[in-house]
């Protein structure tokens, strides 16, 4: 294999990126070809094999890297790993060495697995996967290792990752083996077999039908820092507006304007917090593609949105991204769409500027200008399992993408189109998306799925954090009161706390049964269940300052707000396969419970931990089996934490939502850092610090000036020991 | 898109094939490019787009078409369909029109679906699929339509079939639509949208990363004849030796030589028929690849095989096709194997002559020469679901194939290697294989799976017949006595009637529970269950003459012995989705029952039918719900049939197995045609006819000369009205 040369052009963001001198060839060559490496930014290197495709996640991105965030990370001078490449008639193969005790995480939203070493994954966009082959709503060609670096294969192709699953065959030699030769395979009919490398210890990435590829290496030195660097390279994590962190409720798909008013009134009257109402404007055609024109059920959307704004509700609209002939933008989009329809609608080529802009302009003038806060984009995830629900891989698009590439990029570039609406108005949004992909951290969109297994949903929270993705375990219906409570407890500890009641006319706590619910027959004791659910939703409102602080870390430092324990404790073997509990920020450990469990195992990593509900203290590095009373989702706070809890309020506009009780867990606390978000497009994010004097046993809030109604104040301190 | 030229070379069998003049361009052009068609054989055409790959099922085949069989089919002069092709930077797309009421079947062993219109399938070799995406042990790029033709895409790539699932977007025009323009889409902002074709009515085949493809069209005129033509082009169907149609029993994997003797003795002593014993010779390494050297448990295999031969047992050996370093052929195979190992073993390149021959030679000298009758090749089906159980798609082989192509061909070319052993000795074999593919009809190998859902297993019998495949719903364990009986009833109506007790030390009827079975604790009433099972196995022995006759039709005419009803009754809408009952030959309809059912629906197509057990007469074109007593699997015989049933015997060497009772179902019977198979390599297959005189009410067997012990005789006639 001849030596390959590097291409130094960096695609879409080349103007931003520094090129530093090539590093010395300090790494050993194996069978594949070496490639010279180029430095992209501090701690980020690019390896180019052959001539990469024109359409990739990197070449079509529109968000710029967060240079300020990247500066906060250690300046790493030496690339920690050298991917090797092979160009052959099939395409490109990339080879990355694996150490003996090295574990691999990421590759996007993987519902069926957590640690990836020992598995093969073909990263194909495909909704609701039931088998662990790599099909995913949101496959991401990025992984991170416990050795403290990440690898991003910049392709929109369905690449296959063989993660320590392959072994080269040995070579025949006449020389007797010695230990130095590598693996002994023993004598064979007078000759000897020798393995030069233990090829089980490597990752192979198969990218067929390309003539080249860019591979990016993100250094740490820790695993978390490698993820941070990847997220910051993508542009830094999304920072949802505070209202986005409040409670969401999606009403029944058929509800008309006046019925949505009634539902809004119900929430306010019954004192159940709600910041965002989701609704379907009735603009989908019979064939499921959309016109984006308000349906007959909504005779005066501008007034409705204005009324809801006064009552402190944001409104999120459901849509499909496929454009029906009755849509006013159909004719304009025709030349900027793929050659195949979905449900009788056009597939906009969101990779083209025109495709994004035509779509965005109409959304701005018809929705966002009158007060719509965001969107939920459904079913853009290429289900092969449910028949003709998407465009074929053989589709061709004006941008030059084929259907395979477009599947990998469709959700991403849709998010660009919607983002551009809000960016243009200097507003913020927060919404939902059924498909995403690489370099997605900056997008204020949360993934969800038609699947509904509660355990899988919990796994999704832990697993998505490796790949710059946000995931909501939305509550739809429940099998029992217990199931409803357990699911609601989980979702309030997630990026987007939502009940998606699109097939229930009344709130699920009024009646669990779907038919009875829609007929208005409420359960005998529904007020009792409502009350329990209210309490859980109030818990979400209390948590917003802490969650918001974690999202600021995502935004500025690339630290995923929801993440698996292994990201913070990569050297602890006990957390290697742990995805049924997760961290919310660095100080809160959440271990959700599913219906039917009266106890569960939890593992607490190093340090001391306080159970949130009982304040009971637990030693770390220990597994416990704990009782799990129905009212209490197991939550543990790391000793040394000052946890701010807001007064529960009906919405985040309420000044109460800024009034904090500070829980001080143990001696020797560190200050809690919060950020005052004024809700503006580019918020100032004034830092405030809650400080506990461990000697005087009193706390104070450190900030400049006196707080206004919409700034933090501490109304009580509670010391817990 | 420029007009493509045809390549006339036909790969591996070009010397055999006639080329007839090109036909006139009588078919309308649509968006894709036309290709001139070349006639391959009577009723078979080839369409070539671009430059096809060198490694395909057709180019690597070793069996010649059955010219004599093809001559028996109607000589069709005009190609019934014109596939169009598009060469683009992605690869090749093939387009085939679909009529309004046209239904599609085939694509290999598809467990999750039957009729394929409305579905997308990516035909990828992958064991035990749980979702209907096209993953299969035996994907076959051939389908057949109710319009009476078949299409074969000659590729070893993972092609995707969009079967009436795609729709082109319409075009904008300034001209008002008329009905003649095609589909109306209506006015649009002063312009009009027009669809030139209703593109939902087409099949698209996406074959990425190829520069060309050959597409074969097999005419009918009926759907069954199209399947026949495909099977005959492949070489005609396999004709198992009579012993292969007897009863098979695979013993526990750890059984040693003396224990296998004991098991054989048990079958003879307890008067349970058995023709074939399957065993594992203990030659797999700890890592699962094989040496092909008899293990320590078998100190004298030659004597064992000789003893078993005397006792009329054939012996089938389990193996993997991956070659362990301790195998004597390892060193020779090293240069003729892929660059990656499986379980520490070589992946022989069976596409190369050397790869096949080295493997075959050792099997001949060490096994077949001392009496082994055949093999069961396990786990060659590329499971992505169970970790590193196969070679990567990026593998490279000396033949030039990559891993993707090799997956599609590995099972096929393995069968060539094993066939060559028996062909070389002028012997016949019958065995089992976990992966197969295109043009497989001539191979005397039956597919099986690690799946175990009884309904899926029944579906497999009906579904496999479209694609030149044989499938056995093998019995392994059972949840209950009822489950055992129901599964056994199904398997005796299949191509290979086998209990695969590889994890049970005793016959399953002695003890259903696995643990107790292996500890030798038998159920209290086991003799009763044994007796019921013996009866079912005896039924298999009775059926052999009829099954054998159906296999001769497979061999000589390409008619699948086991097939779905739609193949014989393509115009009957009631059978369009019917895969829980099937035809065995044209006169027997089998409707298996699964445990837990006390009744089931059956549909009888046109004609009159007799229930096998009760002789009750049923009108056709009618659905019935019938009671299903445990002892009776529902079987229906078409009126006018003479059904020969052999005397049950312990093995097919027994002269009793040639002694027939002829059941005469109704008036106006047609003669039953049987074939006397002398068991030789190229058997003479003397035709004998059972004829019933409908006036005299007496029957006779028409044949030349007096029968010997190993020729058919009718010992009783039974008239049923």
Image (cartoon, coloured by chain):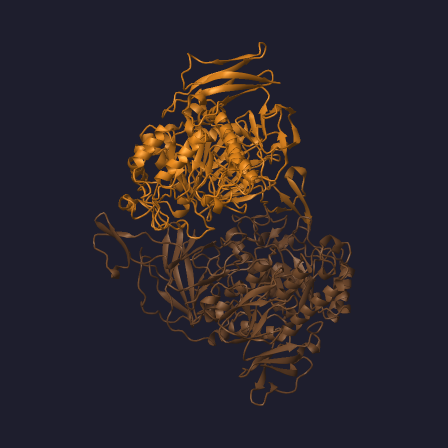
Chain colours: A brown, B orange
In the rendered view, does B474 fall on the left or right side of A598?
left
Instruction: Point out residue B558 in the picture as x, y percentages from the top left corner.
Output: 47, 28
B714, above or below A178, in the image: above
Give the camera-side residue of B535 and B369. Answer: B535
* Residue at the image position 65 percent from the left and 37 percent from the top: B180
Q: Kindly identify the residue that appears in the image at 32 percent across and 43 percent down.
A: B295
Image location (x, y in percent) of residue A151: 43, 63
Q: Nearer the viewer, residue B446 or A258?
A: B446
Assign the C terminus of chain B to one quadrant of the image. Answer: top right
Would you place residue B515 above or below residue A214 in this image? above
Residue B371 can be seen in this image:
no
- Residue occupying the far front of the picture: B524
Q: Position of residue B584 (x, y in %)?
A: 53, 28
| Along the line of sight, the residue nearer the viewer: B361 or B170 | B361
Q: Position of residue B141 (x, y in %)?
A: 48, 39
Q: Nearer the viewer, residue B269 or B92?
A: B269
Count of labels in the image: 0
Corner quadrant of residue A251: bottom right
**Residue at far top of view:** B696
- In the rendered image of this protein, does residue A416 appear above or below residue B462? below
Write down the quadrant of residue A594 in the picture. Answer: bottom right
Give the vertical position of A337 relative to A590 (above or below): above
- Any part of residue A479 in sight: yes
């Amino acid at each position: 294999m001849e030596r390959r040369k590097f291409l130094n052009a960096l695609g879409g963001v080349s103007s931003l990126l520094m090129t530093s001198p090539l590093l010395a060839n300090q790494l050993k060559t194996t069978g594949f070809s070496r490639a010279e490496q180029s430095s992209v930014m501090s701690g980020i290197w690019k390896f180019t094999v052959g001539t990469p495709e024109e359409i990739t996640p990197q070449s079509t991105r529109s968000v710029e890297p967060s240079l300020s965030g990247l500066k906060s990370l250690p300046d790493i001078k030496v690339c920690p790993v050298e991917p090797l490449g092979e160009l052959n008639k099939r395409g490109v193969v990339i080879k990355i060495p694996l150490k003996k005790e090295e574990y691999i995480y990421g590759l996007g939203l993987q519902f069926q697995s957590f640690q990836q070493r020992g598995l093969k994954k073909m990263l194909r966009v495909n909704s609701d996967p039931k088998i662990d082959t790599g099909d995913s709503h949101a496959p991401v060609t990025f992984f991170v290792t416990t050795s403290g670096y990440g690898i991003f294969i910049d392709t929109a192709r369905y690449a296959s990752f063989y993660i320590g699953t392959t072994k080269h065959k040995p070579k025949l030699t006449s020389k007797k083996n010695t230990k130095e030769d590598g693996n002994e395979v023993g004598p064979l009919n007078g000759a000897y077999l020798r393995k030069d490398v233990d090829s089980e210890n490597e990752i192979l990435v198969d990218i067929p039908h390309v003539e080249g590829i860019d591979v990016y290496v993100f250094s740490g030195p820790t695993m978390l820092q490698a993820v941070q660097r990847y997220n910051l390279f993508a542009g830094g994590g999304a920072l949802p507006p505070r209202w986005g962190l409040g409670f969401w409720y999606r009403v029944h798909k058929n509800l008309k304007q006046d019925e949505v008013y009634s539902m809004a009134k119900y929430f306010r009257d019954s004192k159940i917090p709600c910041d965002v109402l989701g609704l379907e404007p009735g603009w989908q055609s019979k064939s499921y593609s959309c016109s984006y024109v308000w349906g007959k059920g909504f005779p005066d959307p501008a007034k409705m949105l204005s009324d809801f704004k006064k009552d402190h509700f944001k409104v999120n609209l459901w849509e499909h991204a496929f454009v029906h002939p009755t849509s006013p933008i159909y004719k304009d989009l025709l030349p900027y769409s793929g050659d195949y329809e979905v449900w009788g609608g056009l597939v906009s080529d969101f990779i083209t500027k025109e495709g994004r802009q035509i779509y965005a302009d109409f959304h701005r003038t018809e929705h966002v200008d009158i007060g719509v806060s965001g969107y939920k984009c459904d079913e853009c995830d290429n289900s092969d399992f449910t028949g003709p629900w998407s465009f074929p891989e053989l589709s061709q698009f004006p941008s030059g993408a084929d259907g395979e590439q477009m599947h990998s990029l469709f959700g991403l570039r849709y998010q660009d189109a919607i983002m551009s609406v809000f960016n243009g108005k200097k507003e913020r949004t927060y919404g939902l998306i059924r498909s995403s992909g690489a370099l997605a951290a900056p997008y204020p969109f949360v993934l969800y799925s038609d699947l509904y297994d509660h355990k899988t949903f919990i796994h999704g929270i832990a697993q998505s954090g490796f790949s710059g993705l946000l995931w909501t375990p939305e509550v739809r219906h429940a099998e029992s009161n217990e199931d409803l409570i357990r699911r609601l407890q989980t979702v309030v500890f997630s990026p987007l706390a939502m009940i998606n009641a699109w097939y229930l006319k009344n709130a699920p706590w009024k009646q669990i049964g779907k038919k009875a619910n829609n007929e208005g027959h409420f359960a005998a004791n529904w007020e009792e269940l409502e009350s329990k659910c209210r309490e859980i939703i109030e818990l979400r409102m209390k948590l917003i300052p802490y969650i918001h602080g974690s999202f600021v870390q995502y935004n500025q430092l690339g630290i995923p707000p929801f993440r698996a324990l292994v990201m913070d404790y990569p050297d602890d073997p006990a957390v290697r396969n742990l995805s049924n509990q997760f961290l919310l920020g660095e100080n809160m450990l959440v271990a959700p419970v599913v219906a039917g469990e009266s106890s569960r195992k939890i593992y607490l990593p190093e340090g001391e931990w306080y159970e949130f509900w009982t304040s009971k203290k637990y030693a770390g590095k220990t597994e416990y089996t704990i009782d799990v009373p129905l009212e209490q989702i197991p939550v543990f706070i790391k000793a040394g934490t000052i946890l701010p809890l807001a007064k529960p309020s009906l919405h985040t506009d309420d000044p109460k939502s800024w009034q904090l009780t500070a829980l001080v867990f143990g001696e020797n606390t560190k200050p809690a850092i919060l950020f005052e978000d004024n809700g503006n497009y580019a918020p100032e994010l004034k830092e405030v610090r809650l400080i506990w004097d461990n000697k005087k046993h009193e706390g104070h809030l450190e900030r400049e000036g006196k707080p206004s109604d919409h700034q933090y104040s501490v109304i009580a301190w509670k010391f817990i020991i």
